[in-house]
């Protein structure tokens, strides 16, 4: 006598769907869990790693600020957590009395501002020409521009010094400091890539209406590449602001020296006669780093967005 199997009510669970099973169902469960974890945010392990990385990155800045405020220097690890009674602002007054921090910041600002202005003007003009104007040898000019980026600046110091200081008599002047950095090939490359992403039909229509190239550049191209302007300014700023070697060579007058050069002279000549040279040097470093940090914090979202946008567009 055979036993007839009765149909099972309800859907039959797929293989491996049990609580202790493995196989396809387990893989599906892990995939779904991973998707839920990714959708809900970072995993706890990733958060811990990122937090540790942020602490390691920010600790030198924290130690610099704390060291600049200490009355009695403490170079040990415990100096990172000083006694509040040992904190003071005397170090800033001491270094300001020796090198005039405000005047050094003004010199650095004029030097950096002149470099940024020249970089933007020449970078926009050269980038527009290389991207949107057809002329014979355009590819060769672009290739030479990329080749220039491989030449270290230190290799050009002696001929530049002879040409600018001896021939043009531009020593101890802002023009002499700015001239070697007036054209930045990196900025030219940035503007060229942004101009190439613009639709060519806009420029063809403007040319058919009789607009000249400069008018097209000013009224059509520039408003559409504002993110490139922010990117070029941020990329250019940090170089001349921290530049030491070239201003040190062309400026002998202390009243013309940028802050980086003044701090170097203070470290080598004056710091030994200061009660707390360690704290005074860190105070000057804080003043030098503050504008760069503030600029990055203010324009961080523009910098990140333009960097991401330039990497996905093609």
Image (spheres, rainbow, N blue to C red):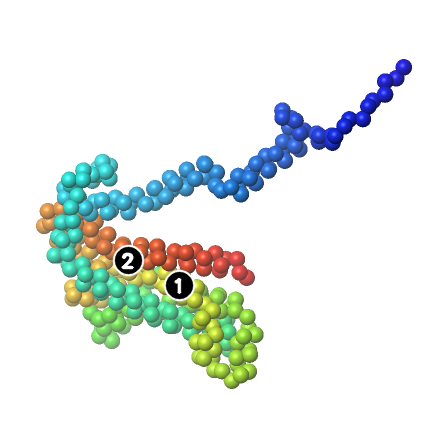
Q: Which residue is mark 2?
A: 291
Tell me if residue 38 comes above or below residue 93 in the rendering.
Answer: above
Q: Residue at x 17, y 57 (%)?
A: 265
Q: Would residue 31 appear left or right of 133 to someone viewing this image?
A: right
Q: Residue furthest top?
A: 1
Q: Is residue 94 visible?
A: yes
Horizontal side of residue 287 vs 303, given as left or right = left
Q: In this view of the protein, which residue sits in the foreground, 226 or 153?
A: 226
Q: How busy is the neighbourhood of tag 2: few (under 14 within 10 Å), some, or many (20 plus)? A: some
Give me the residue at 20% from left, 69% from top: 172
240 lies above or below 19: below
- Position of the C terminus, as image quadrant, is bottom right
SS for dot 1: helix
Tag count: 2
Residue tagged 1:
230
Question: Which of the 4 image quarters holds residue 125?
Answer: bottom left
Asked if 254 appears above or below 70 in the picture, the reply is: below
| Residue occupying the point 52% across, 57% down | 312
Q: Nearer the viewer, residue 142 or 286?
A: 286
- Whichever of callouts 2 and 1 sits on the residue coming sooner in the sequence is 1
**Residue 11 spot, x, y in % from top left:** 74, 31
Q: Residue placed at 24% from the left, 76% from the top?
A: 168
Q: Position of residue 52 (x, y in %)?
A: 37, 39
Q: Secondary structure at mark 2?
A: helix
Query: In the rendered view, does 108 fall on the left or right side of 146?
Result: left
Q: Quadrant of the N terminus?
A: top right
Residue 140 in the image: state x and y as whole percent: 48, 71
**10 Å crowding of disc 1: few (<14), some (14-19), many (20+):** some
């Amino acid at each position: 006598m055979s036993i007839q199997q009765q149909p099972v009510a309800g859907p039959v669970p797929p293989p491996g769907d049990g609580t202790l099973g493995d196989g396809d169902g387990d893989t599906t469960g892990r995939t779904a869990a991973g998707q839920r974890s990714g959708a809900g945010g970072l995993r706890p392990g990733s958060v811990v790693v990122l937090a540790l990385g942020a602490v390691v990155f920010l600790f030198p800045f924290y130690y610099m600020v704390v060291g600049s405020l200490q009355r009695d220097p403490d170079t040990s690890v415990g100096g990172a957590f000083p006694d509040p009674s040992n904190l003071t602002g005397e170090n800033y007054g001491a270094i300001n009395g020796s090198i005039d921090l405000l005047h050094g910041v003004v010199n650095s600002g004029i030097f950096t501002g002149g470099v940024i202005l020249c970089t933007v003007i020449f970078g926009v003009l050269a980038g527009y020409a290389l991207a949107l104007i057809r002329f014979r040898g355009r590819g060769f000019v672009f290739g030479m521009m990329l080749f220039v980026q491989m030449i270290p600046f230190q290799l050009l110091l002696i001929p530049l010094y002879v040409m600018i200081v001896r021939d043009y008599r531009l020593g101890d002047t802002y023009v002499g400091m700015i001239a070697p950095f007036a054209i930045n090939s990196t900025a030219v490359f940035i503007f060229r890539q942004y101009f190439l992403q613009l639709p060519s039909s806009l420029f063809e229509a403007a040319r058919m209406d009789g607009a000249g190239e400069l008018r097209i550049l000013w009224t059509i191209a520039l408003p559409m590449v504002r993110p490139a302007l922010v990117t070029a300014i941020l990329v250019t700023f940090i170089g001349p602001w921290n530049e030491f070697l070239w201003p040190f060579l062309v400026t002998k007058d202390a009243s013309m020296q940028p802050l980086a050069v003044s701090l170097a002279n203070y470290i080598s000549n004056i710091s030994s006669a200061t009660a707390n040279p360690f704290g005074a040097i860190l105070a000057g470093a804080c003043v030098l780093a503050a504008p760069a940090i503030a600029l990055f914090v203010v324009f961080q979202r523009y910098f990140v967005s333009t960097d991401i946008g330039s990497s996905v567009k093609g």
